[in-house]
Image (cartoon, rainbow, N blue to C red):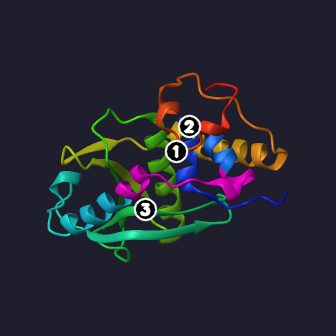
Amino acid sequence: MDKVLLEVTDLKQWRYCPRIVWYRYCTPAIRPVTALMDQGRTNHQAEEGREERRSLRMYGLKAGERHFDVRLRSEGLGLRGRVDLAIAVPDRTSPGAQAVVVEYKDSEAPTGSHFKLQLTAYALLVEEAWQIPVTGGWIYKIPLRQAEAIKLTTSLRTQVTTTVATIQAAIGGEHMPDAPANRRPCITCEFRRFCNDVV
């Protein structure tokens, strides 16, 4: 099987439950869509409208050029996706320009490693597309109306590339991954009925 260009959200999902990613690519005809997924998309769209009216102080910035729902693609990284918000400081073409990436999450929970990995993948894509360094990342929690700074560490950047390689190997070999140790998310998972070995 040829390597597929993964979605950035696949990395997040792989960290959360790798079987969902495997089902998506190895059995693509059975992807269910839940009401929770639809609600998440609606909340993201509404947040973009509010974001346009907010100052950038929440992200530790005095000024910047906002770009919403930025489509990104990299054959080299093996990834594609759309980041909710990328901010060029002061803009994309100024000497010494930098960027910040922001992801909206419809969650009040502490930011998990899966969200940090996703945000870092978007940072790498923006760096390649805009040819400027991404120096910061933020998770904006919609229910709390709060932004949390995420350090885009060397370790996280390395984890993006290793996770892409691991997913590609699983898809290419059509080897179903083990279920996650934590089975609580299985209760509301759209693929619950397919994991008869654990649920």
State which quarter of the image contains the C terminus.
top right
Q: Quadrant of residue 163?
A: top right
Residue beneath label 1, please? 12
State which quarter of the image contains the N terminus.
bottom right
Q: What amino acid type should be assigned to the residue bearing mark 1? A: Lys
Residue at 29%, 70% in the rendered image: 66
- Where is residue 182 drawn, in percent x and y? 53, 23
Residue at 53%, 32% in the rendered image: 186
The front one of 47 and 102 is 47
CA separation in Å, label 2 and label 3: 18 Å
| 33 part of magenta stretch | yes
Residue at 68%, 61% in the rendered image: 5
Residue at 50%, 43% in the rendered image: 117
Check disc 1 and report its element: helix, strand or loop.
helix
In the picture, the disc for residue 15 is 2
CA separation in Å, label 1 and label 2: 5 Å
Q: What amino acid type should be assigned to the residue bearing mark 2? A: Arg
- Where is residue 8 drawn, in percent x and y? 55, 55
Q: Left of 123 or right of it: where is 73?
A: right
Magenta residues?
A: 24-40
Q: Left of 4 or right of it: where is 14?
A: left
The front one of 184 and 130 is 184
Q: What amino acid type should be assigned to the residue bearing mark 3? A: Val
